């Protein structure tokens, strides 16, 4: 019986040497004449264990990691094909604490299947949601998504069902589904993991959105820095087209829907939906004024659903298991699960999917394991480069949209960057302003000029030039940017700056004078 060995082809695993490990396994299998095959799966999201190698046994999958090419011979000697003991053996994959504590709904197949095997996808309950959707009235699909409580996982947290209903009700000969896969926030990688590890779930989610709204064409706008995701999604679309999942008759129904993969050009601001639409149309990626909303006048001026990868990838399980099943997870107005991405100076960096409601402290200290350096945690930034810095005093904050908003924070795309006590928060505040100045599309004055003045003011504070006056000026600039900017780039840049000033005021004080020795 052929034994299956799983070695990730996820970009994170590749960066840690997975390709060399796969070649070493292939050589060893051939040299020993073994009846084994290698499947290149997605990552499970435990990056401190990558490259993570799994072998399918009668007991279940057994994991080994992190594996280096030099470990391969000894792994086979130890009976790897039977799940034999070895110093790198982690036991049954599903029993690894980091995985066992999760509630994997959106990421249920990620790291489990061959990403480009439609048979694998079907075997693990794929296409069940789309099969149900094509037999339903569009309004019933929209109602199910609305009742589930699903909100946009890209950052704004806007109810997905309301957006779909707006497009469904809009008049027009052509409607579009646009997937925002321009995942540009620091400490985020959930979109990439789905596209590289389970691309069909995104295709299925987009097809359901199309059936619900009457759209017949879709685009996935992927950041150019994700070549592996672009390649995997392109291949998956071709497979879906050949299988009749996409095309003039979606799964044999009367609904037509096809899609294309488009690559971005490296601008952070194109993560904002109207900038993305301009870029998709071949124009410069600058923010559009709203209204009109993209749901009414989006791509090429037509009604358009613009959703994030995780939002769309969460739809198939809602359609398969029902709105109540999904809504039962979470708390308050934050329903379902959220893929938390833990990064920065942290011991156990990776993706952890769970229901909304864990405290920030649980995520950082228990799941993330504290800092990689072993030093005390000083600050945690949640929500990418535009997210607020939370000190340990706020670690009891539940991880949900409303709780973070009450503390002047935002969940955003659920990326968490951990900093130890060596971090300079004035430097971090300056970086936020500098980032905004560099990435601004330049259309509105508060963002374009305010961020530049912010960098200059932070430098004056650092130099001890009228520190009190310049701290007040920096706060005033933040207020102007927050309420006067056209989009979230300028509007949210004040979050990291003001949180750093509020929670770490000592870092904004002039450095003490050192007296010269007599």
Image: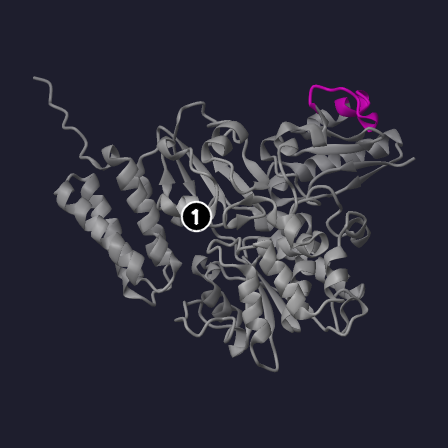
- In reply to whether residue 228 is colored magenta, the answer given is no
- In reply to whether residue 88 is colored magenta, the answer given is yes
The answer to whether residue 272 is visible is: yes
Farthest-out residue, top: 518
Q: Which residue is disc 1 drawn over? A: 402
Q: At 26% across and 60% down in the image, what residue appears?
A: 449
Colouring scheme, one of rainbow, by chain, secondary structure, one colour: one colour
The quarter holding residue 286 reads bottom left
Q: At 18% across and 40% down in the image, what residue appears?
A: 463
Residue 260 image offset from top left, x and y in percent:
65, 67
71 or 137, nearer to the observer: 137
Q: Is residue 172 shown above or below 231?
A: below
Residue 132 image offset from top left, x and y in percent:
75, 61
The quarter holding residue 267 reads bottom left
Please state the extent of the stretch shown in magenta in the rendering.
Answer: 74-89
Q: Report whether 368 appears left or right of 447.
A: right
Q: Report whether 493 appears left or right of 460.
A: right
The quarter holding residue 257 reads bottom right
Farthest-out residue, left: 518
Tell how many labels. Answer: 1
The answer to whether residue 430 is visible is: no
Q: Report whether 416 appears left or right of 228.
A: left
Q: Report whether 174 appears left or right of 332.
A: right
Q: Quadrant of the C terminus?
A: top left
Q: Secondary structure at mark 1?
A: helix
Q: At 19% across and 42% down in the image, what residue appears?
A: 461
Farthest-out residue, bottom: 173
Q: Quadrant of the N terminus?
A: top right
Residue 512 image offset from top left, x and y in percent:
16, 28
493 or 162, nearer to the observer: 162
Residue 248 image offset from top left, x and y in percent:
75, 74
């Amino acid at each position: 019986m052929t034994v299956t060995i799983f070695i990730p082809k996820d970009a994170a695993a590749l960066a840690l040497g997975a390709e060399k490990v796969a070649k070493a396994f292939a050589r060893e299998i051939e040299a020993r004449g073994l009846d084994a095959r290698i499947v290149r799966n997605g990552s499970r999201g435990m990056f401190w264990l990558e490259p993570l190698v799994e072998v399918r046994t009668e007991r279940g999958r057994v994991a080994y990691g992190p594996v280096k090419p030099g470990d391969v011979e000894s792994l086979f000697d130890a009976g790897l094909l039977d799940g034999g003991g070895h110093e790198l053996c982690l036991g049954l994959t599903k029993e690894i604490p980091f995985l066992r504590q999760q509630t994997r709904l959106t990421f249920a197949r990620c790291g489990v299947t061959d990403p480009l095997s439609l048979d694998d996808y079907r075997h693990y309950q794929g296409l069940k949601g789309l099969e149900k959707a094509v037999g339903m009235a569009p309004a019933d699909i929209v109602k199910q998504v609305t009742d589930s409580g699903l909100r946009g996982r890209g950052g704004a947290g806007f109810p997905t069902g309301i957006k779909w209903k707006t497009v469904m009700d809009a008049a027009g000969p052509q409607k579009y589904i646009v997937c925002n896969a321009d995942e540009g926030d620091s400490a985020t990688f959930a979109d990439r993991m789905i596209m590289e590890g389970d691309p069909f779930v995104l295709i299925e989610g987009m097809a359901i959105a199309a059936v619900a709204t009457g759209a017949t064409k879709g685009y996935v706008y992927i950041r150019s820095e994700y070549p592996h995701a672009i390649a995997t999604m392109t291949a998956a679309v071709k497979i879906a087209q050949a299988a009749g999942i996409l095309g003039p008759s979606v799964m044999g129904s009367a609904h037509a829907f096809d899609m294309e993969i488009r690559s971005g050009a490296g601008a952070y601001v194109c993560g904002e939906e109207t900038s993305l639409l301009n870029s998709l149309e071949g124009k410069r990626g600058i923010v559009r004024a709203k209204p009109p909303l993209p749901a009414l006048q989006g791509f090429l001026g037509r009604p358009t659903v613009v959703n994030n990868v995780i939002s769309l990838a969460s739809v198939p399980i809602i359609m398969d298991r029902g709105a109540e099943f999904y809504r039962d997870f979470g708390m308050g107005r934050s329903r379902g699960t959220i893929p938390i991405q833990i990064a920065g100076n942290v011991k156990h960096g990776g993706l952890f999917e769970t229901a909304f409601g864990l405290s920030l402290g649980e995520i950082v200290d228990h799941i993330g394991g504290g800092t990689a350096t072993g030093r005390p945690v000083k600050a945690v930034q949640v929500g990418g480069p535009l997210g607020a810095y939370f000190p340990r005093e706020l670690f009891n904050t539940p991880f949900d949209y409303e709780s973070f908003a009450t503390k002047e924070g935002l969940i955003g795309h659920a990326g968490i960057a951990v900093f130890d006590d060596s971090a300079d928060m004035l430097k971090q505040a300056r970086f936020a302003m500098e980032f905004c100045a560099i990435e601004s599309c330049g259309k509105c004055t508060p963002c374009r000029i305010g961020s530049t003045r912010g960098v200059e003011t932070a430098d004056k504070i650092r130099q001890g030039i009228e520190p009190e006056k310049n701290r007040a000026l920096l706060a005033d600039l933040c207020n102007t940017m927050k309420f006067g900017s056209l989009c979230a780039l300028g509007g949210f840049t004040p979050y990291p700056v003001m949180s750093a000033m509020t929670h770490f005021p000592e870092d904004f004080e002039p450095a003490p004078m050192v007296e010269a020795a007599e």
